[in-house]
Image: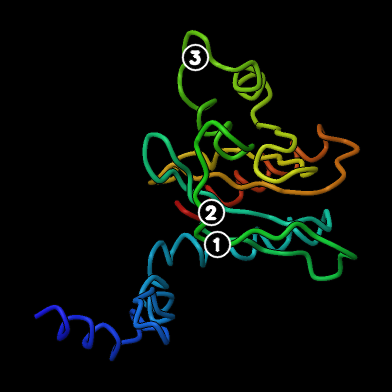
Amino acid sequence: MRRSVVRTLEAHELCRRDRFKRISLGAGLVRLAEPVEQDLRTLARPVLEELADQRQATAHLVVREDEDRARMLMVVEPRRARMHVAFRPGQIDPIGRGSAGLAMLAAAPPVPGEREEIAAARRRGYAVSHGEIAAAVTGVSAVVPGARTQTVIGLSLFEAPDVEELGALVVEAAHRLAALLH
């Protein structure tokens, strides 16, 4: 029984065997996952592209996976930047780390003992983190208001000379995406 299931999965490229007959995930899973949040990704792409090119920084779209985790749903790299931050779509991070997770936590009512960065994000309307997901990377993120799933749009960059300007750009992008979703 087990062999026939594995063969079926292999036939659909959902898994593969290496030369030692170990089974691992296959590239067919990428095609299978493509429709997930397709409407959100389709609407977000032009907003993310404009944001990435405007600041020559990596733009990201993150959704809340569950109570404790956030998933990088989409990453858009700037087209003409000398260098950029690279993230892998599908990457999952703890909700309490990085600007996207902090923005999600800031959208909720205050919790006793929460980090000062969450309270600051609540006051500003966007979250900022430094080196929490990747060393030497600053993240600036804002919640997309009214999204069906808690969604955040943001920027990741090596140098952030004016965090307030970046915050305003990210908040404006989040509101543009919210308008497209409704």
Gap between marks 2 and 3, in whole Å? 25 Å
| Contact check, label 1 and label 2, Cβ < 8 Å | yes
Q: Amino acid at mark 1?
A: Pro
The part of the image, by quadrant, that contains residue 81 is bottom right
Per the image, the residue denoted by label 2 is 72
Q: Amino acid at mark 3?
A: Pro
Residue 145 in percent (x, y) is at: 51, 39
Residue 149 in percent (x, y) is at: 40, 46
Per the image, the residue denoted by label 3 is 110
The part of the image, by quadrant, that contains residue 175 is top right
Nearer-the-camera pick, 123 or 94: 94
Residue shown at 73% from the left, 55% from the top: 51
Per the image, the residue denoted by label 1 is 89
Residue 109 in percent (x, y) is at: 46, 17
Q: Quadrant of the N terminus?
A: bottom left
Residue shown at 21% from the left, 87% from the top: 8
Residue 135 drawn above or below residue 105? below
Instruction: State which mark lies toward you, 2 or 3.
Output: 2
